[in-house]
């Protein structure tokens, strides 16, 4: 499959990032330092490779190395996610749900690989990251791949967890490396240790009620505003502040 | 709460994503910082005599600072969100700095031999960077505060960029009170003070920018 120079993936710089090229499309963004380790070359430079024998399976068929499989899957992930995400950003609720589900699956396997010693933390961190993605969705720049943006925030959340847990674990963690992408292989959801529903009870009354009405009962902002006698914009502000507060509680909560 | 319930909750009535308020927040913080550094400089050191503003000296500093402000604030804005590239902004900052060094070197060469040391060190070289950094601290606080409300994920770099912006604002304030007149002095000691503030920001970034 890898025979013939044309089909070989190469890497080209774009917007200061490097994107892996695979079959004419950019599928994965990575940093300069990762190049050598992954035996990839830049499209604008000649490959400086040491001759490595082709990998053959028992029937003399070339096997695609695992990491390249990931890139292909990555491409599917990004191309599936991006249109959904763009619709979600412009206000489509269903697309947003679908996009978050896709992302949650990737997050789960990403965090699972990085929290080998703390498997109980995975689902909590997935929820925390989803909350962070939602609260910071304005920071997404449509010229960039959604998966790179998600990965940026997920890494940030992972590092934050390490810091909260003391740096010891962070030292053992190869934070940049081959496995540091949002590769597929999606394990099922496990039970979260902390219950967001009960954390909601700790919010100030106005924020809690605004969230319960619009986010849980599904009332429209107008209906919620009529029922509480608070203006529509105030309801929106309360919801946003409430979710922010919730995210802060999630980080603070002792385990 | 199950993750799927959370997802439904987040998406329900989410509406379109709001605009990213990076310009608004950083500009507000920077204005506040500039005000603070100017007031501090005038109150602590005292203004230069008005006649000095008819000479080139304070304007050189201000022009240098304004040019640096363009690049450093672009850098800070880009580091306030995940993945955006910083190459252009870094190039802009570096080239302004190098241009200033070049200008300093040229003026140094053209000054007569005897005056070179005094052009380089002035009378205040040992205090200038520290004073500048001190005047920048309110700006640094404001900018880090503003950045925290955005979405920085590269915390050290973001802190450094915040520090550079603050340092530049401190330099603007300090230029109202600083008696030095040579280009070489500004190129070295002002830059040193700005970098110093950058390092303070870099040190603070991972601590205060977490979210």
Image (cartoon, coloured by chain):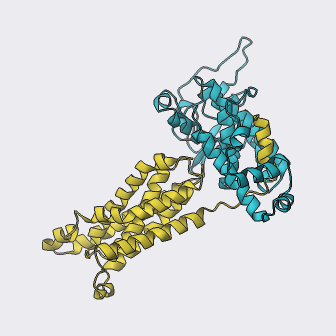
Please indicate, yes or no, whether residue A22 appears anywhere in the rendered image: no
Please tell me which residue lies in front, A37 or B175.
Answer: B175
Whether residue B149 sits left or right of residue B187 in the image: it is: right
Please tell me which residue lies in front, B193 or A59.
Answer: B193
Whether residue A44 sits left or right of residue A27 in the image: it is: left
Extreme residue toward the top, this view: A58
Q: Looking at the image, which residue is at 29% across and 88% down?
A: B51
Q: Looking at the image, which residue is at 30% across and 65% down?
A: B131
Q: Looking at the image, which residue is at 53% across and 46% down?
A: B210
On screen, residue A59 above or below A146: above
The quadrant of the rendering that contains the C terminus of chain A is top right
Please tell me which residue lies in front, A39 or B29.
Answer: B29
Residue B132's quadrant in the figure? bottom left
Q: Colour of chain A?
A: cyan
Whether residue A5 sits left or right of residue B78 in the image: it is: right
Q: How many marks?
A: 0
Residue B1 percent location from the top left of the image: 75, 35
Please tell me which residue lies in front, A59 or A28.
Answer: A28
Q: Looking at the image, which residue is at 43% across and 58% down?
A: B163
Residue A159's quadrant in the figure? top right
Q: Colour of chain B?
A: yellow
Residue A137 percent location from the top left of the image: 69, 52
Residue A93 percent location from the top left of the image: 83, 50
Whether residue B193 sits left or right of residue B159 in the image: it is: left
Please indicate, yes or no, whether residue B117 appears anywhere in the rendered image: yes
The quadrant of the rendering that contains the N terminus of chain A is top right
Residue A230 percent location from the top left of the image: 78, 63
């Amino acid at each position: 499959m890898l025979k013939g120079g044309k089909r070989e993936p190469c890497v080209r710089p774009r917007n200061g990032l490097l994107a892996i090229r695979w079959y004419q499309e950019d599928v994965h963004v990575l940093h300069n330092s990762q190049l050598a380790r992954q035996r990839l070359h830049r499209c604008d430079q000649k490959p400086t490779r040491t001759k490595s024998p082709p990998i053959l399976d028992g029937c003399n068929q070339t096997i695609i190395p695992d990491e390249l499989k990931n890139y292909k899957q990555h491409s599917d992930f990004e191309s599936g996610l991006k249109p959904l995400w763009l619709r979600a950003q412009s206000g489509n609720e269903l697309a947003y749900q679908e996009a978050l589900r896709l992302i949650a699956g990737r997050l789960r396997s990403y965090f699972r690989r990085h929290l080998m010693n703390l498997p109980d933390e995975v689902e909590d961190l997935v929820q925390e990251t989803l909350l962070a993605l939602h609260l910071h969705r304005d920071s997404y720049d449509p010229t960039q791949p959604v998966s790179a943006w998600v990965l940026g925030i997920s890494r940030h959340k992972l590092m934050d967890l390490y810091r909260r847990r003391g740096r010891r674990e962070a030292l053992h963690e190869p934070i940049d490396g081959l496995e540091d992408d949002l590769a597929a292989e999606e394990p099922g959801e496990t039970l979260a240790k902390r219950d967001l529903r009960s954390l909601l009870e700790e919010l100030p009354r106005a924020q809690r009620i605004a969230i319960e009405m619009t986010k849980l009962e599904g009332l429209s902002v107008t209906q919620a505003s009529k029922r509480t006698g608070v203006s529509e914009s105030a309801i929106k502000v309360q919801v946003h502040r409430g979710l922010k507060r919730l995210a802060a509680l999630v980080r603070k909560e002792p385990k | 709460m199950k993750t799927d319930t959370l997802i439904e909750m987040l998406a329900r009535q989410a509406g379109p994503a709001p605009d990213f308020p990076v310009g608004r927040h950083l500009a507000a913080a920077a204005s506040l910082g500039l005000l603070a550094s100017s007031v501090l400089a005038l109150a602590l050191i005292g203004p230069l005599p008005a006649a000095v503003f008819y000479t080139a000296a304070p304007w050189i500093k201000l022009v240098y600072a304004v040019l640096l402000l363009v690049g450093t604030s672009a850098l800070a804005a880009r580091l306030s969100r995940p993945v955006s590239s910083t190459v252009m902004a870094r190039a802009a900052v570096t080239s302004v700095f190098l241009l200033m060094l070049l200008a300093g070197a040229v003026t140094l060469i053209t000054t007569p031999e005897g005056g070179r040391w005094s052009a380089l060190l002035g009378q205040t070289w040992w205090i200038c960077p520290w004073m500048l950094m001190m005047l920048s601290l309110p700006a640094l606080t404001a900018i880090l505060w503003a950045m925290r409300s955005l979405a920085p994920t590269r915390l050290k770099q973001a802190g450094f960029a915040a520090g550079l912006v603050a340092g530049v604002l401190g330099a603007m304030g300090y230029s109202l009170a600083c008696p030095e007149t040579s280009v070489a002095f500004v190129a070295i000691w002002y830059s040193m003070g700005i970098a110093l503030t950058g390092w303070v920001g870099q040190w603070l970034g991972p601590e205060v920018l977490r979210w």
